[in-house]
Each structure stands twice: as structure tokens, then as C-alpha cells.
Amino acid sequence: MNQPITHSTGITPAGQTPYSAWIQTDVLHTLQNPVSHHPGEHAWITSVQVSELYWMLIIKEIRTAQAQLRKNDITQACDTLERVVAHHEPLNATWKSIAWMTPADLLSILSRAVAKYGQDTALQGWTYRQMVYLLGIKQPEHLQHFIPQPARWKQLNDTLAEPSLYDDILAFLHRAGFPIPDMTERDYRAPYIPMQAVENAWREIYADPDRYRDLRRLGETLADIAEGFSTWKHLHLMATRRTFGHRAAYFGTEGIAWLLPTLQELPFPELWAARSTMGEPPMVCPHMSRQPKGQAA
Ligand code: HEM
């Protein structure tokens, strides 16, 4: 005879299963308040809420990696940062849920949202901005969007004044003996200015992978994180092209024109700059024939 399944006793509140109590499903599914009956709106709210959760997860992982770097635990820091790479995959996949919308779909939703809440911009989302600050892209001008939300303004202002992940990596490289300046006293609010000495350090690391196995792994993980971040930006731009066209957006300027320059925001700049001079130069450019024009090979 089949026995009913019983779970071990815990502190599950009355009226909940342990699963619901742990995952907070009842609360979770009250958090969508659509302004329309359009099928795209539930997809939109779900995609954005999932993105919010992933940005917070990435923030937590970056903070963990920073603490590990400060203890000179590069192996643990790499493990943590590899999870940041993994989290970008589902984050970037969220675009699939809404990329099918046409301008008519999106605008019918947005016009109702504007009527209910007022004109908004995703620049008012603090999780994305905190992640961007922690990646080392410090743009104090974005703080202005949080003036109506003082607790979040303070949180972002504090993050702006703290070392970013890249600041912690440079401090680690300095402690490891690379001839780069000690930056621990720098004004972390100021945008980071790339340095030749840091570019040289990355080149040295990649030139001797046996000696610098862990640091090379760190560099490649950072490159993967930057790629995941840039991919999100590209997918956002393409979704804007598809659903919005060249309309004026929040600032009254064309949304695409506003977004395009932000694609240049690439974290860990010297890691990329160093790639122009890494490796042995070939005797001739690999794209050129070794034979002078007109002679058979
Ligand atoms: C698919 C329709 C979308 C359109 C047409 C659109 C449009 C725009 C535009 C024009 C901007 C520039 C700032 C402004 O004028 O407000 C912007 C910024 C932004 N949007 Fe969207 N967006 C869309 C979807 C989303 C979604 C689904 C998310 C979140 C998951 C999002 C997050 C952001 C963020 C974080 C920024 C700031 C980007 C940066 O600073 O580089 N957007 N968006």
C-alpha cells in the first residue's frame, strides 16, 4: 500500500509547504502588477524582474571575489568570478522572451505604464548601476536618477567611493610584485584612467603562462565577464532597434543615439589593450601571401 509522503518536521508556517516557504512562491507571484492585458507585458515584467535578481546575484559574487582577493586567495576569487560568467548566460537569455515584440506591442504597454506611473527610464534601476560601478565603470552623473530614492542614492554613492573589482585586482597585482603604482589611496569616485604599467603587467602574465597560471586564468575570466556584460548591452540595443526604432526616449534625444556610445564601456581596459601587443609577431602578416603578386606558389 502506498504510504502518504511526509516531510520531516521543520518550522514551515501553517498553510505553506516547505518548498513554498523556502522559495517564497506566494510572495513572488504577487509581485507582478501589469497595466495591460497584453501578453508581452507579463513577459516584460518577468524578464526585467529576473534580470534584477541576476544583477543582485552578480553584485554579491563580485563582493565575495573582492574579499577573497584582499586575502590574496586567487584560486577562490577565480572560482567566484567564473560563477559571474555563468550567471551572464541566463541573464542574457532573458532577451529572448521579449525580443519578439514590435513597436506596436511595446508602445501599447509603455503608454499605459506612463499613464499610471509617469515617464520612467531603466537608468532609475539601482542594481544595474551598482554592478556597473563594481565592474569599475564609475559614472557619478547617474546618481542624479536616484534623488527620489535616498536610501538607494546613498548605497550607490557609497559604492562609487569604494574600490571596484578592478581596483582590487590591481592592488593584488601590486602586492604580487608587478611594477604598477599602489593605487589604494586613489579617489575611487573618479573614472579610472588606464595605465601603461598595468598593460605591461597583463602582457607579462600572458607571456609566461607556466609561471603565471593562476593570473592568466584570472585574466581570461575577466575577459569572459566583460564579454557577457558587452553581450547584454548589444542585445539591449538590438531589442531597442526592434521595438522602438529611432524614437526619442527619456531624455528627448533619440534612444539609439544615446545607447550606441555606451557600447564602448568595456571593463578592465588594459586587459584588452594588452592584446594588441601580446604574442610573437609573425614574420609576415598572416593575411598576406608570401609570394610577390603575379608569381605562382
Ligand atoms: C526592449 C525594449 C527596450 C527599449 C526600447 C529600451 C530603451 C532604452 C533606452 C532608450 C535607454 C537609454 C536611456 C533612456 O533614454 O531612458 C535604455 C537604457 C537602459 N535600459 Fe532599456 N530598453 C528596453 C528594454 C530594457 C530591459 C528589458 C531592461 C532590463 C532588463 C533594460 C534596461 C536598461 C538599462 C540598465 C539601461 C541603462 C543602460 C546603460 O547605462 O548603458 N531595458 N533603454
Image: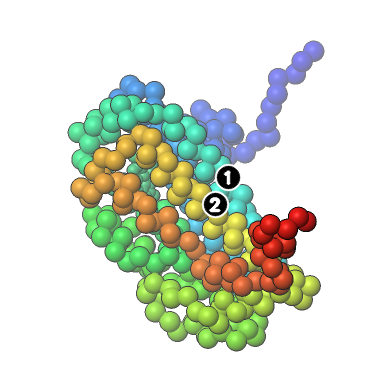
The quarter of the displayed image where residue 243 is located: top left
Is residue 80 visible in the rendered image? The answer is no
Image side of residue 40 versus residue 230, left or right? left
Residue type highlighted by circle 1? Glu
Q: Residue 240 location, x and y as percent?
A: 37, 40
Secondary structure of residue under mark 1: helix
Q: Can you tell me which quadrant of the image ligand 1 is in?
A: top left
Say which of 87 and 192 sits in front: 192
Q: Residue 77 location, x and y as percent?
A: 64, 65
The quarter of the displayed image where residue 198 is located: bottom right
Secondary structure of residue under mark 2: helix
Image side of residue 241 versus residue 224, left or right? left
Mark 1, Cα crowd under 10 Å, few <14 / some 14-19 / many 20+, is few
Asked if the residue under mark 2 is in contact with the one under mark 1, i.e. CB atoms within 8 Å, the reply is yes
C-alpha separation, residue under disc 1 versus residue under disc 2: 7 Å
Is residue 272 visible in the rendered image? The answer is yes
Q: Which label sits on residue 228?
A: 2
- First of labels 1, 2 by sequence position: 1
The N terminus appears in which quarter of the rendering?
top right
Residue type highlighted by circle 2? Gly
Q: Which label sits on residue 89?
A: 1
Q: Residue at x 52, y 67 (%)?
A: 268
